[in-house]
Image (cartoon, grey):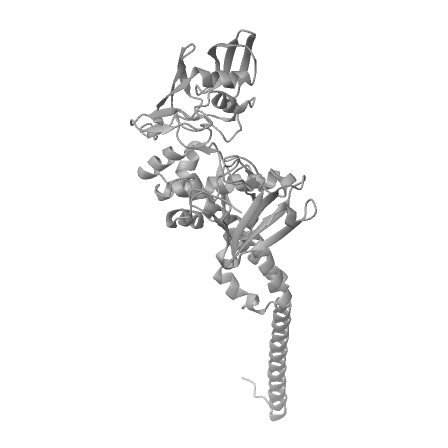
């Protein structure tokens, strides 16, 4: 091996030292640049601007886990970005979340007899004080005052419901009618709070929990649909508190019904992204109907006629009513002045509901069309109706259902044998309760009565 001279050795050692120094300097420069880049990234995050290399990951997690926020692993990867948002960002986010979670509904309140929207006098208790209003207290047509009862609500002592004097949460607007001789009452409140007053008024609180949850989803879907359709916009409202829409605050909320609303919060039924009309009724006649019962040319795609064995043993599974001839004559007189000779069922839908009733008089015949008008024409008001369990009830304005046959004794009475209670479209409430008892879930109940629906959140 060739021997290296001392001079050459010094040159080599100098070169090695220089190279080592350059490498250390380069590494220090890289560390500095990395720290600077990280600081810039954190600065952007503090301003609410997620760096490009994070955007895809954050967006993916938001879509995957919904509006509640990005999952913990993503939150950690952006190093506490949420906590470092500016006050403006937090305020805007909170505003959007409140709007999403707390939609409002406006309810037009009917009088104690559910006969009219107009109130001659409104008496109420608010925050421990009793006050009353008449149209004279509001000088101009359309003039209104809005009251907020806070956490205790407003009790309207001039209204009577099954629960007594109802208490309304949210605000209560008292508005003078167009003619200026009466008042309108409009209760505006969060939709979910409204549902807490609907579910117990539309379904017995003693029903099984999965049935109550199904009722809550139906009621929420129906309410949202009315809001979107602007059903009572001429009154500055979305719905009223009667069977015209959904009964509200007739029965006081119960723990079971409130729990059903809370457990299904935000859940609605849709088809292809659109809200459905979530119809429901008390008891089926053995088969449910579609909206063709009201004259639709073809059924809505989410409605179907299904066999329903679940409520066949309910009291309203079958019934008998005897209606005096004179009472039917009064109904006939609203169409024709001719003496009543007799009735004939001339039309039924696919589920055997009567949708056409021909009335023969001395002056000719006329046709009563549609499930509702047939039930109203054959009103059993004041008459005894005997249910299949032998119990007797006094009839109301409408025949219990349009699923019936009849026998006539001209000049004496009409004997009607019927099945079910209600219009028969959508979900049977009695059927839903029996299904829940047999172990069906809320979703299974809804999917049984409605066709090709999805349960989504709003």
Q: Residue 26 is drawn in which quadrant?
A: bottom right
The residue that appears at 49% across and 37% down in the rendered structure is 113
Which residue reaches farthest front?
Answer: 136
Which residue reaches farthest right?
Answer: 140
Q: Nearer the viewer, residue 175 or 133?
A: 133
The percent coordinates of residue 103 (x first, y second) are 56, 50
The percent coordinates of residue 228 (x first, y second) are 60, 41
The percent coordinates of residue 448 (x first, y second) are 41, 33
Which residue reaches farthest bottom?
Answer: 6
Specify whether 5 is left or right of 201. Answer: right
Q: How many marks?
A: 0
Q: Nearer the viewer, residue 110 or 387?
A: 110
Q: Nearer the viewer, residue 126 or 50?
A: 126
210 w.r.t. 365: above or below: below
The residue that appears at 51% across and 26% down in the rendered structure is 291
334 w.r.t. 206: above or below: above
315 w.r.t. 51: above or below: above
The percent coordinates of residue 352 (x first, y second) are 43, 19
Q: Is residue 306 visible?
A: yes
Q: Residue 234 is drawn in which quadrant?
A: top right
Q: Is residue 106 visible?
A: no
Q: Nearer the viewer, residue 255 or 458?
A: 255
């Amino acid at each position: 091996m060739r021997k290296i001279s001392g001079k050459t050795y010094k040159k080599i050692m100098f070169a090695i030292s220089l190279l080592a120094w350059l490498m250390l300097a380069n590494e220090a420069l890289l560390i500095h640049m990395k720290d600077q880049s990280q600081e810039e990234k954190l600065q952007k995050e503090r301003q609410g601007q997620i760096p490009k290399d994070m955007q895809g990951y954050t967006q993916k997690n938001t879509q995957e886990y919904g509006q509640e926020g990005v999952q913990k692993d993503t939150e950690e990867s952006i190093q506490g970005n949420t906590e470092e948002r500016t006050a403006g960002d937090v305020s805007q986010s909170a505003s959007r979340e409140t709007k999403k979670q707390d939609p409002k509904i406006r309810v037009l309140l009917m009088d104690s007899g559910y006969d009219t929207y107009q109130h001659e006098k409104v008496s109420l208790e608010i925050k421990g004080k009793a006050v009353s209003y008449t149209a004279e207290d509001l000088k101009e047509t359309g003039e209104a005052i809005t009251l907020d009862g806070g956490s205790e609500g407003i009790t309207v002592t001039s209204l009577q419901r099954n629960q007594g004097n109802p208490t309304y949460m949210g605000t209560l607007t008292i508005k003078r009618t167009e003619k200026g001789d009466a008042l309108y009452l409009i209760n505006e409140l969060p939709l979910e709070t409204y549902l807490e007053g609907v579910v117990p008024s539309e379904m017995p609180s003693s029903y099984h929990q999965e049935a109550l949850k199904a009722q809550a989803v139906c009621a929420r879907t129906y309410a949202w649909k009315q809001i979107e359709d602007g059903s009572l916009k001429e009154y500055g409202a979305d719905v009223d508190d009667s069977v015209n829409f959904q009964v509200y605050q007739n029965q006081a909320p119960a723990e079971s019904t409130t729990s059903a609303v809370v457990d299904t919060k935000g859940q609605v039924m849709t088809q292809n992204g659109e809200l459905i009309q979530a119809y429901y009724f008390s008891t089926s006649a053995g088969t449910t109907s579609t909206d063709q019962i009201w004259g639709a040319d073809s059924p809505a795609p989410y409605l179907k006629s299904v066999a329903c064995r679940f409520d066949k043993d309910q009291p309203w599974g079958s019934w008998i009513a005897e209606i005096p001839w004179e009472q039917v004559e009064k109904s006939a007189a609203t169409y024709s002045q001719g003496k009543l000779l007799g009735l004939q069922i001339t039309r039924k839908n696919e589920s055997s509901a009567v949708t056409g009733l021909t009335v023969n008089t001395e002056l000719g015949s006329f046709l009563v069309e549609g499930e509702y008008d047939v039930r109203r024409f054959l009103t059993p008001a004041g008459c005894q109706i005997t249910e299949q369990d032998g119990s007797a009830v006094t009839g109301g304005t409408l025949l219990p259902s349009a699923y019936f046959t009849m026998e006539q004794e001209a000049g004496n009475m009409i004997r009607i044998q019927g099945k079910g209670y209600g219009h028969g479209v959508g979900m049977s409430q009695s059927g839903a309760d029996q299904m829940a008892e047999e172990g069906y879930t809320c979703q299974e109940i809804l999917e049984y009565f409605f066709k090709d629906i999805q349960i989504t959140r709003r």
